Amino acid sequence: MSLFLVVALPFLGALLPGLLNGAGRKVCAGTTFAVSLTALIGLLSNLPALLRGEVIEARVDWLPALGMNVNLMMDGLGAFFACLILGIGLLIIAYAKAYLSRNDNMGEFFTYLLLFQGAMVGIVLSDNILVLLVFWELTSLSSFLLIGYWKHLPEGRQGARMALTVTGMGGLAMIGGMLMLGQIAGSYDLSVILTQREAIQADPLYVPALILILLGCFTKSAQFPFHFWLPHAMAAPTPVSAYLHSATMVKAGIFLMARMWPVLSGTPEWFYIVTTAGLITMVLGAVIGLFKHDLKALLAFSTVSHLGLITMLLGTGTAFGAMAAVFHILNHATFKCALFMSAGIIDHETHTRDIRRLGGLRHLMPVTFVIATIAALSMAGIPFFNGFLSKEMWLEEVSHTTLYGPDWLVPALATFGALFSAAYSFRYIGHVFLGKERDDYPAHPHDPPAGMWLPPAFLTVLVVLIGVMPFLAEPAVKFITAAVLGGEAEVPDVYLALWHGVTPALMMSIIAVTGGLILLALFAPLSNLWEATPRPEAKVIFEAVIAAFVRVARATTQTLHNGAFTQYAAILALAVIAAGGHAWWTGDSLPATRAPLPVNVIAAAGWLMLIGAAVFLVIKHHNRLLALILMGIIGLVVSVAFAYFSAPDLAMTQISVEVVTIILLLLALNFLPDTTPSESSLGKKLRDGCIAVIGGVATTGLTWHLLMRESVMTPISEYHLENSYKGGGGTNVVNVILVDFRGFDTFGEIIVLGIAALVIYALTETLLSGPVRARLLNRIPDKPLAGDHHPLMMVVLTRMMMPVVLMIGVYIFLRGHNLPGGGFIAGLVVAIGVVVQYMASGFNWATERQRYPYHGIIGAGVLAAGLTGIGSWFPGHEFLTSAFGYFRIPPMQEFELATAALFDLGVFLSVLGAVMLSLESFSRLARRAHVEDSEYAMDIDPSRDDPPEGDRQADTPDGKES
Amino acid sequence: MEFLFASGVGVLTAAGLYLVLRLRTFPVIIGASLLTYAVNLFLFASGRLTIGAPPVLMDGVTRYSDPLPQALVLTAIVISFGMTAVVVVIALGAYLGADDDHVNDPQESDSEDRA
């Protein structure tokens, strides 16, 4: 099976459990199991090729320009982790089915689990480090969902948040590190990076890249000083803890260190940072773990400790260390997962995880007792269990490692850690299962159903099998180690065996186990001492740090973002002017290359009108109606300017937009006060005036400068002019650009326009359903209203004009491809025709005759444009490729049909719908305010025989009296 | 002619900036509209000024104005209508909801002036 499918299967399958929730728990869990199993079988189908020495690859170019391609690769290391993730995943799914109670939403759980599984498989099979980063972040997000699965528990939410913060920050650091690494190596493909050891280690960016990548690994794998999130993540359901903290999430950091081992390891920086962090984590985790009373907290700290152990092995940079690390990853996954599951069983059956309330369970839960004991003895490092073998290798490696001076320091610390490690393992057995049977368990304990104990039992079989017959695992371990070493070192020629003779490692092991037993015997006084010692509490510190960040962020935001819009606008304007000024004075300037066009009377008159209207507008802006009229004048001059300077399409668009904008602002002015009071002080006016004048002078200079020079590069417009008719079949180049060359742009634009109209609609709805509605109803119009609702002349005239307007709209639309016009302008023209009906005959009359809702028209427009684009897929072209042809239907002339016309139809509909929906929303507000709307569309209608004189007077609202 | 065009853009910018810095919603909206005109004209100017040569292909004609800025400005004009409408409805909602059309949040210092 292709690697793509292996990675994609969990993601695709993640849709199923949520959908199958209603079909029952068995179906839900069974489907999830089947998805994981299929992925695992798909993975294993690649094994024969892998064992032949091939590296399985699957490549697809995604963004080759950025070096970001979906390249997947599976070598021994990737296959090992993928098998762990999918294999243990299967056991977890079976276990979770029995573990989750009926109140838990099982579909949601398995959806999250599969998402997480897919992300993990993605990490271990990625060849491209940028794609790896994407999966890396996905594991952070999906584990957040899993850890916080019990949303009702505050600990769950806090733990999930802490895990996301810490691993997310590490992920950010790692992005930086990976980008540097890719820059150094010249490629983002691991297969290339891994061959560049010398170049990378010689580069000055090696140390920063190393530190950033290690930050990512350490946070993910809970290494000191980032270990604190892992115990808090224990608030998750136990299957999650078992999955995330035995074989997957926390091993992702380890995986990455192993993956990068050939290029990053072997330097003093790597050795000191990784080995030290690993050693401290190992010892610290073991010591804290012993004194935890919560079963899962004990296991959490033991996980931290064991992760430290593996990290340290990778840090030493020797081939033997790497081999021991690989072996311990396998062993730890088996025994720790079984232990988490057994802790879940105990919690499930006794309703407590507090070790002080347990004890003497061996007769009540014999099966669990056997499973937990085997796994815990393996964790303690007792012979005949697999933990012993890899721990022995670790101690062997430790005895050759020297850090910070004295030879004895590292072995002594390691033995100390191992001693506590043995002690907490014994405590897990001794204080939970051994001892006197009690009569105060919160619930009557008994062995769980087979669904819960079979998965851990399977793992313990592996524990014993590898422990007794290590030679079974040896070929696999060596194979994987070879992949880790990546040719930088030889796979060490040692055998995995129980007996290596009396070595220093064996002595250290004996000391640790004996010491562990003694420590357990002295547990009560030691525990009291531990409780009495003051210790920093990670959660408190973490929350204080977060709170401090929030305070700083809030203070900064509130200073800058203080709600004074005027201030933001001034800062923005000044910043733009300053940036432009900098460019102006530091940049080069070429002499003018264009001769200016001569000035004539018409242009001068237009200029005078524009300047006059603008100046007058600034002076008189307190009178809002006058301001609106002056703005209309400016808009007209601008349209005329477009027409004058050879842009007929723009002139037509500008003038029709002008009409709808003025109508819109008039509707708004209906509610807003008539005048703007003069509130600014003289100082503020002067300041604003200065900003305005500087801005104006700057734009004048810039525009003039631009207009007097030819462009430095050849404009691409020539291409459009040449190909408009040949390629697009139209002679109006502007329209062909809109519907053809840059059709995708236009498609986006009509969507934006549609969204804007829907926003207006939604805001109006909100206003009308909130307290504003009551205010509107009680509002007394502050302006006297016209006596005539719907003057006869206007109604008749507009109705007669309607067909003419529609005709013009159709005409403008049809000719658009070849002459000025097109969908945008036609949409605006038709919208104006319809709006006029609303204005003349009233909202009720017009609404009764409205056949299609405006939202629908917008949707139909976007759909028509989109479908036209999709249509070009069928003959095998890119999205929105246009086609055209010339046809002749006998009585008519030959005419052209282009798919671009269909697209333009979509533009037409969207523009029409959007303009109408916005204006209609405003009118709806207006209707609320003036409840009176004549029930007749015409005030005087000759066909109505009762001129309702009396009614009319009663209906007519009189602003002054009411 | 070029200077007339450039100064027209400049005056529209200046008037727009001044009005955007006013304290009530309505002049700010008008000011933003003036800035829209100025920006559209400026974008249009990047095609340089040409008289009597619309970009509509005809036999025998070789001189055309630059069609690309025109196409871009055309959609900009329509979109700016949509944006103006959104801003207007927000301004209306704010005014109807609070009976206040100031654009700035009331500050501690001048809250008494308003009362």
Image (cartoon, coloured by chain):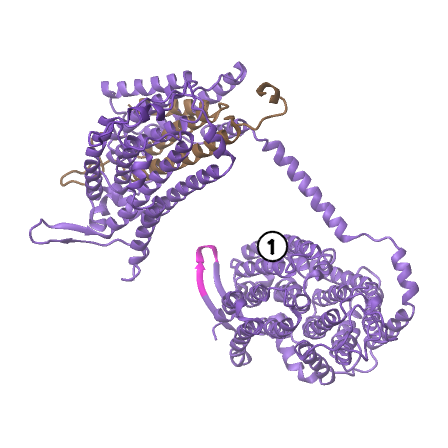
Q: Specify whether A957 is left or right of A24.
A: left
Q: Position of residue A178 (x, y in %)?
A: 58, 56
| Magenta-tinted stretch | A60-67
Q: Residue at x 23, y 51 (%)?
A: A727
Q: Specify whether B115 is left or right of A223.
A: left
Q: Is residue A356 visible?
A: yes
Q: In the rendered image, which quarter contains the C terminus of chain A?
A: top left
Q: Colour of chain B?
A: brown
Please state which amino acid type lies under the numbered disc 1.
Answer: Gly
Q: Position of residue B6 (x, y in %)?
A: 35, 25
- Residue A416 figure quarter: bottom right
A848 vs A840: above or below? below
Q: Which residue is mark 1?
A: A177
> In the depicted view, which residue is nearer to us: A216 or A526?
A526
> In the depicted view, which residue is nearer to us: A780 or A326?
A780
The purple chain is A
